[in-house]
Image (spheres, rainbow, N blue to C red):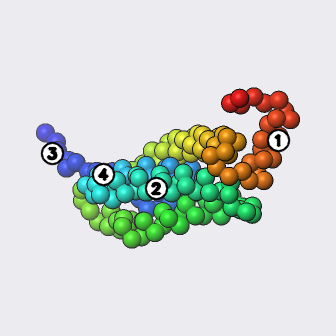
């Protein structure tokens, strides 16, 4: 009879989280960090990552339209990655600590790829929804109108795109 193997919990490594953040944005990072902290039973960190990360993501999406100059996409992506690096190096286990633990192991790179793809699709959906809500709110006067939003609305009206009116 075979001996029962002790149960090992699977964590995302810091490098897997970093790569997923670069490829898929903050949604993948938030998901992976929350999963890791739940497995490690650090529920306060999990809650903080979930709520603060989501708030920062949506806040940045709204603020992008109100920054008076064009920001390259790489700078926006770097801002997500900097937040994730800070969390990983200050509050997360290192790869060596995970490897040394007998109760922990790493998730498969295939799982990371799947989470990255789903995170990318979810990020695009959230970006689209928030951008549309900002445009609508600016058009009805709830938010200030910017040159960028005016050009978007003019382009939509010149193409006879009926949106919410």
Q: Which residue is mark 3?
A: 3
Q: Which residue is mark 2?
A: 53
**In this view, which residue lies farthest toward the bottom?**
90
- Closer to us: mark 2 or mark 1? 1
Q: Which residue is mark 1?
A: 154
Q: Position of residue 97 (x, y in %)?
A: 32, 67
Answer few, some or many: residues within 10 Å of disc 3's Cα (few below 14, many 20 plus, some between 14 and 19): few
The first of marks 4 and 2 along the sequence is: 4
Q: Position of residue 79 (x, y in %)?
A: 58, 64
Q: Nearer the viewer, residue 151 or 110?
A: 151
The reply to whether discs 1 and 3 touch (Cβ–Cβ < 8 Å) is: no
- Closer to us: mark 1 or mark 3? 1
Q: Is residue 15 left or right of residue 91?
A: right
Q: Nearer the viewer, residue 22 or 50?
A: 50
Q: Which residue is mark 4?
A: 38
Q: Residue at x 61, y 52 (%)?
A: 62
Disc 1 to disc 3, C-alpha distance: 70 Å
Mark yes or no: residue 5 visible.
yes
Answer few, some or many: residues within 10 Å of disc 4's Cα (few below 14, many 20 plus, some between 14 and 19): some
Disc 1 to disc 4, C-alpha distance: 47 Å
The reply to whether discs 4 and 3 touch (Cβ–Cβ < 8 Å) is: no
- Secondary structure beneath dot 3 equals loop
Mark yes or no: residue 117 visible.
no
Q: Residue at x 26, y 62 (%)?
A: 101
Q: Residue at x 33, y 51 (%)?
A: 10
- Closer to us: mark 4 or mark 3? 4
Q: Quadrant of the C terminus?
A: top right
Disc 4 to disc 3, C-alpha distance: 28 Å
């Amino acid at each position: 009879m075979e001996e029962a193997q002790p149960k090992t919990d699977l964590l995302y490594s810091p490098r897997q989280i970093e790569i997923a953040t670069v490829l898929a944005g903050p949604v993948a990072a938030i998901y992976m960090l929350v999963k890791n902290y739940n497995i490690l039973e650090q529920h306060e960190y999990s809650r903080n990552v979930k709520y603060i990360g989501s708030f920062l993501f949506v806040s940045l999406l709204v603020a992008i339209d109100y920054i008076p100059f064009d920001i390259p996409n790489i700078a926006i992506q770097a801002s997500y990655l900097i937040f994730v690096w800070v969390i990983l190096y200050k509050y997360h286990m290192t790869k060596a600590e995970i490897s040394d633990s007998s109760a922990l192991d790493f998730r498969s790179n295939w799982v990371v790829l799947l989470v990255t793809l789903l995170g990318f699709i979810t990020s695009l959906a959230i970006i689209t929804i928030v951008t549309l809500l900002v445009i609508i709110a600016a058009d009805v006067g709830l938010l200030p109108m910017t040159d960028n939003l005016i050009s978007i609305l003019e382009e939509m009206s010149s193409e006879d795109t009926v949106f919410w009116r």
